[in-house]
Image (cartoon, rainbow, N blue to C red):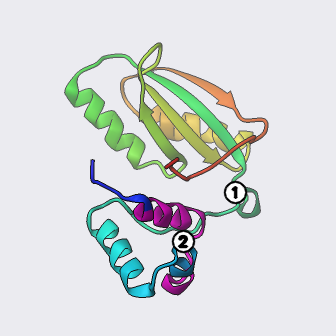
Amino acid sequence: MIALDEIDLKLLDILQNNGKLTTKEIAEQVHLSSTPVYERIKRMEREGIIDKYVAILEAEKVGKSFIVFCHVTLKQHTKKIGNQFVQDIISLREVTECYNVSGDYDFLLKIVVRDMKHYQSFVINDLGSIKNIGSVHSTFVMGVIKHSYAIPL
């Protein structure tokens, strides 16, 4: 773990809430001049603490508001099969998150599509074409209560 001081943490918190702020605007919030703030942010980018900057879209406004959490169990558990599954999942745009989990299932997928019909097509044509899937259990999101991309600092 890389050592972060209080100012670094404050900078990260500010950037997580609004990555479009200028260095000057951020500097005002942490009571420093622009140069040290700029240097700290660049250091955290170089060190990989800040991975990237993105635009977060409103799913409903782009017609992709149907969210499904999908539990997947593999038939077999070899290194080759696991790696192939991971590569296959990475290639599917509808899968926005994939976690290797413990418990009754091997993987948890977050899938974002237009509607139930789109999900049905995705399961049959895309997910169904991946070899060695033993079972798939889907949970459909009825409403989002809390959604954040921020890492608690």
**Image check: 2 left or right of 141?**
left
The boundaries of the magenta stretch are 7-25
Which kind of residue does numbered mark 1 sit on?
Answer: Ala
Q: Main secondary structure of the magenta part?
A: helix
- Disc number for residue 19: 2
- Mark number, residue 59: 1
**Mark 2 vs mark 1: which is more N-terminal?**
2
**132 shown above or below 20:** above
Distance from label 2 to label 1 (Cα)? 19 Å
Q: Quadrant of residue 51?
A: bottom left
Secondary structure under tag 2 reads: loop
Residue shown at 26% from the left, 63% from the top: 47
* Residue placed most toward the observer, 118 or 23: 23
Q: Is residue 29 magenta?
A: no
Q: Nearer the viewer, mark 2 or mark 1?
A: 2
Name the outermost residue toward the front.
31
Callout 2 amino acid: Gly
Could you tell me which residue is drawn at 27 percent across and 28 percent down?
81
Q: Percent position (x, y) of residue 144?
A: 74, 42
The answer to whether residue 9 is magenta is: yes
Q: Is residue 101 left or right of residue 138?
A: left
Q: Are marks 2 and 1 in contact (CB under 8 Å)?
A: no
Q: Position of residue 85 (x, y in %)?
A: 34, 34
Q: Residue furthest right?
A: 143
Q: Could you say which is closer to the camera, residue 29 or residue 101?
A: 29
Q: Residue furthest left?
A: 79
Is 102 rendered above or below residue 85? above
Residue located at (41% from left, 78% from top)? 37
Q: Position of residue 26 (x, y in %)?
A: 53, 77
- 112 and 26: which one is in front? 26
